[in-house]
Amino acid sequence: MNKLQLFKNNKEENLIKIIYLLLIIISVLPSAFLLVNLKPYLMIFSMIASLSISLIFFSYKSIITIYHKNIIILLAIIYIYLILSYFATQQTLKNFFSYNFLKNDGNFFFCYLPFFIFSVPFFNYKKVLNIFYSIIFFIFSFFAIFGIFEYLTKFSKFTLQYNSGAGYMFVALNFAHNATGSVYAVVSIFALVFFLKEKTKKYKILYAIIFIICVFGLFITKSRGSYVGFIAGLIFVLWMHFRSIKKFFISILIFFIASIPFIFITNVYKRIFQIFTSFRGGTDAYTTITRLELWKKAWYLFSKSPIFGIGFGRYNDIEQINYYRLQGIPGIITFYNDKNFIFNTSHAHNSYLQFLSETGIVGLFLILFFWFICYRTILKAYILSDNEYFKKFYLVGMASIVILFILAFTENYFSATTIMICISIQLSLTIGLISMDEKINNTNLKVV
């Protein structure tokens, strides 16, 4: 082979590598827009691009990973159930495909798409996960550093919102501090796992810095539910990693002692105290009372239709609990069929009550069973694998589900786009990674 031919071959190989890398980046591009939901079209276009790549590869090979199979079948059943629930309550086809519905009441359909997208093994899952986490850590560190600067100096307020009860809150470029706080709680745990599992000193230091920056960013979101979710994830990860009561408690103690300066600098302690003082009145009492009223409304509607709920997307259509009509058999099966359709961000502020009120016991069981299957699949892989590098991703995946389940008590995070896009991408890629784990696959050990 002459030098010219060799040069051409190398050039073609480099071009293929560049195209391959670009396709990987595009496939996980939605992760770059988790903190900019003020510009929702960025997330929408990136998801369309990611879905398109998946469909192209699926049409070419028509395969999905064995570890995704049961999970996406169950998710498809959930989609069908929610669609049937939607149309059973006289809601229109036009509304179902409207932007307002998919952005608010029906965003569940949008934010679980990554489970389908990454079930198609069109890339090396290990490489895609590395790029995904690189994007996540860079974006979240960048916004946190900028937010910390603004919070401490008040030189500018691009990433801050002001609340009379909480003061200035870090929101990045999102609508609400809770959305930002929830995803920072998850990403902080990502960084913690990477720090604990890393063997190389320079990278260990890097992940420690990212962890500190992200936790600081989490603190200044002033999202109390996110604090609780983060603590739950912290406890879970430290226990799973050390498996020693002594090391576990020492590490917990070290974290809380190291956190004291940040807690006072960011006034986090005031937000925590407000959880208890809000019941006695004050500026924060309205939030607590409102949330309790929303929970009461959700439980009341569930009691009227416990099996199938009042209809998917119908909770916020009932503005006043004293003025509504349910059709069916009260206390068994009833639906809300009125033609007033309201598309807004109102919800029960609790995923469990939200699903119970709209989709009943059947709907809540399906979504909880879905998450149980995801968790069990990754847990078995974590136990069976002898690949420490892969186990890092498995631990992150399990921790994400634990955090989500805690967060879901204070907001409808099972259908919240910001955190669910992040978790859906990460979990689907992690489940795909199991197919590359030699110990599991060579010994025919099934994890599903």
Image (cartoon, rainbow, N blue to C red):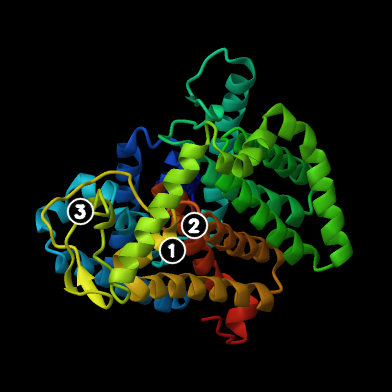
Secondary structure beneath label 3: loop
Indicate the position of residue 401 as horizontal and vertical percent values.
55, 62
Secondary structure beneath label 1: helix
Is 105 situated above or below 32? below
The answer to whether 126 appears left or right of 42 in the picture is: right
Label 2 is placed on what type of residue?
Ala
Is tag 3's residue or tag 2's residue first in the polypeptide sequence? 3
**Label drawn at residue 352:** 1
Of the residues tagged 3 and 2, which is closer to the observer? 3
Of the residues tagged 1 and 3, which is closer to the observer? 3
**Label drawn at residue 323:** 3
**Label drawn at residue 408:** 2
Residue under the point 57% across and 12% down: 155
Is tag 1's residue or tag 3's residue first in the polypeptide sequence? 3
Q: How many marks do you count on the picture?
A: 3
Label 1 is placed on what type of residue?
Tyr
Of the pair 30 and 125, the residue shown nearer to us: 30
